[in-house]
Each structure stands twice: as structure tokens, then as C-alpha cells.
Image (cartoon, helix red, strand yellow):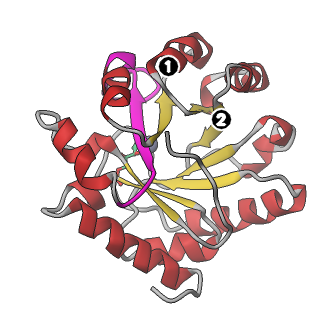
Amino acid sequence: METLTYKRGEPIICPSLLSADFTNLERDIKKVEEKTKILHLDIMDGHFVPNISFGPLVVSAVNKITNMILDVHLMVENPGDWVAPFHQAGADILVIHLETTPHAQRVLADIRQRGMRAGIALTPQTPVSMLDYLYDDLDLILLMTVNPGFGGQQYIPAMTEKIRVLRERIDDTEKPILLQVDGGIDETTAPIVAGAGADLLVAGSAVFGHDDPADQIERLLGAARLGTGQKA
Ligand code: DX5
Ligand code: ZN
């Protein structure tokens, strides 16, 4: 299995399987696994978000064919009920939405206790201050830069300031918490979000919506590096 090491200022592109060809998942995963180490998997329940995607069965199948780090983004109600099934399926990072539970700390602690990395996601409308008492229990924060539910949506410009604010707060904690962004990331928005302080950039349609997903990862990485002031 890949290990997750991260150096500040060196963004990682996380391809989202949601935009892959579901009749050829293995082929599409093989196309990206040489270029990056994190695979993003979107789980939607048709309640929290107005769409249904896939569940632990597919995550488990993916786990059998790749060594990539499986980053599972739960967009489901009652996330606490799904910690054990997705752990069994092979999730390495398990991300829950703050909006789906009044007991986030309990669920995050459960995720970590099982040996996974714990993440929390915020929809665009949820203020960063909602995380104020959760930093001790977090390995990753996912800021949604579109309203969750679908691939291929447009980046919401107001999220750039939100990324900056969260970056400062994370830095103030001096904890190694990763800042991930998800939704509408392409060659135009990648430098903006990376420049604002995002570490991990999820990209679905910008990777799998093109003929050469591996080349797209290189392009997105180059764009993100420009945003952080590095050479592409
Ligand atoms: C949306 C999902 C995203 C989605 C992103 O609810 O959380 O991960 O796959 O797709 P793009 O990159 O196409 O906006
Ligand atoms: Zn996602």
C-alpha cells in the first residue's frame, strides 16, 4: 500500500472515480495509479445528496485491484453506521460530512480507532468556525467547492476565501491536518485553490472526462504548482 506522506506546498491530485467509466473501472484506475497515490471515492445515499452512487461492495472491489490510498468521501446520513463497513471494504481515509451528524467527534474517534485517517467535509454554506472544537480528532478537512451530489459542476468563487481562512486556522493549530478541496477543480481553478492553501485537489471530470487521464493529472499538477509559486 502507498503511504501518505505530504510536504506543504506540494499539492496532490486525487482523481475522483465518479467520473470514470463504470464499465471499465479497472482500466481507468490503471491509467491514473502511476501518476498519483490517492484515489477519491464518492459515496452518495440519495438522502443527504440528491444522487446515489455506489457502496462498500465497489470500494472493496477497487481495493483488490490497486495499491492506491482509498479516500472515501461519505455523502450519507447516519455516517456512524458506515464506519465499520467501509473500514472492512478497505478505506484508508474516511471522510464524513459535518452536516450529517450532531456527534461528529464520536464518529471521527471511531474512524481513527479502527486505524483509518479521519476527515470531515463541509458543504459550501457551512462556516469554518463549526470545526473549532474538532481539530484534535482530524487528519483531513475537505472543503466542498461545489454543492455535493454530482461531478462536472462549476467551482463556487466564494470558496477561495474560505480556503484561505481554513488554511490559517489549520496553521494556527500546528497540527498536520490536510486541507482537501473537491468540486469544479480544473486547470483554471487548480492554481487558485493551491495558491489559497489547498493540499489535496480532488478532480473528477477534469481527469476522467478526457482521453488521457494520466496526462490530465500532470497538467493539473503543473497548474496547481504554479499557484503555489513553484515551477510547473
Ligand atoms: C461531488 C463529489 C466530487 C466529484 C467532483 O459531490 O464529491 O468528488 O466527483 O467532480 P468534478 O471534479 O467533476 O467537479
Ligand atoms: Zn468527493
Cα distance, mark 1 to mark 2? 12 Å
Front-lying residue, 140 or 129: 140
The answer to which image quadrant residue 214 occupies is bottom left
* Amino acid on which disc 1 is placed: Phe
User: At numbered mark 2, what does the secondary structure look like: helix, strand or loop?
Assistant: strand
User: At numbered mark 1, what does the secondary structure look like: helix, strand or loop?
Assistant: helix
Asked if 7 appears above or below 225 in the picture, the reply is: above
Q: Residue at x 68, y 19 (%)?
A: 114
Sequence-wise, which precedes: disc 1 or disc 2? 1
Which residue is under mark 2? Answer: 117
Which residue is under mark 1? Answer: 86
Predominant secondary structure in magenta?
Answer: loop
Front-lying residue, 58 or 194: 58
Q: x%, y% of residue 218?
A: 34, 72
Instruction: Let me know if residue 91 appears in the view.
Output: yes
Q: Which residues are magenta?
A: 35-57
Q: Is residue 49 magenta?
A: yes
Front-lying residue, 177 or 161: 177
Q: x%, y% of residue 86?
A: 49, 19
